[in-house]
Image: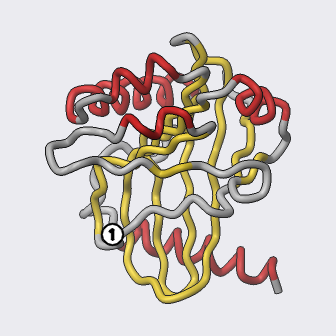
Amino acid sequence: MKAFIRRMALLTLCVGLLGSSASLSTPAFAADAKGIDADADFALKEFTEKIAGSEEFLKSAKGILVFPALYKAGFIFGAEYGDGVLRIGGKTVGYYNLAAASFGFQAGAQKTSLIIMFMKDLVLEKFQKSSGFELGVDANATLVTVGAQGSLDTTKLGEPILAFAFGQRGLMAGVTLEGAKFTKRDLK
């Protein structure tokens, strides 16, 4: 049953992305390391330019996982997918993909940028050593919201993993990370 739900979710994602490509018109899935790095640079630049206080978070992070384009689509069954890069000290140390499936009342498609910051060395090490890190199982992430003036709540700096979703485009509200699985990719 679980395999069937995952297949249906991925099928829903593909159909949703094909059907909504006009409304989500920015670079599609980055196919190679160079493309993912360039898209991540752009996402980080957008994050620091548009969100006040973001630089304080970036400086405090032990590692930063950047998903420049996270796609979510669903109709009853839903799926999320994106390619990203892990950076430590400003240098790329690995490439990852994020995949998640869901079931429930949902309809639409959206694209968003996602930055996950590892604020503690221990959590970053656990992520790097894992062959399939899953939020909600291996660790929890705190989704940080942007305030009315585009500023961030700095009281969250003490949390071990912080997640920032920004630049949402599309017809589906909300970002959920529970059950999101991260898998390391072998890109050069």
Q: Whole-percent x and y of residue 114?
A: 45, 44
Residue at 23% over, 31% down: 52
**Colour setup of the view:** secondary structure
Please report the residue visible at 70 percent of the width from the left and 47 percent of the height from the top.
Answer: 182
Q: Which residue is mark 1?
A: 20
User: Would you identify the image quadrant in which residue 50 lies?
Assistant: top left
Question: How many numbered discs sit on the rendered protein?
Answer: 1
Q: Quadrant of the N terminus?
A: bottom right
Question: Viewer-proximal residue, 155 or 132?
Answer: 155
Q: Position of residue 40 (x, y in %)?
A: 43, 29
Query: Closest to the observer: 18 or 3?
Result: 3
Outermost residue, left side = 149
- Horizontal relation, residue 155 to residue 140: left or right: left
As drawn, 46 above or below 9: above
Residue 175 position, x and y percent, is 45, 62
Q: Between residues 65 and 109, which one lies in front from this camera angle?
A: 65
Residue at 40% x, 31% y: name it: 39
**Considering the image in quadrants, where does the C terminus appear?**
top right
Q: In x, y percent, where is residue 48?
A: 29, 26
Identity of the residue drawn at 33% across and 62% down: 21
What's the amino acid at mark 1? Ser
Residue 88 in the image: above or below residue 78? above
Q: Is residue 64 above or below residue 136?
A: above
Q: Is residue 104 left or right of residue 35?
A: right
Left or right, residue 49 beside residue 14: left
**Which secondary structure lies at badge 1?**
loop
Tell me which corner region of the image, top left, top right, bottom left or bottom right, holds residue 58.
Answer: top left
Q: Quadrant of residue 127?
A: top right
Mark 1 Cα shell of 10 Å, populated few (<14), some (14-19), many (≥20)? some
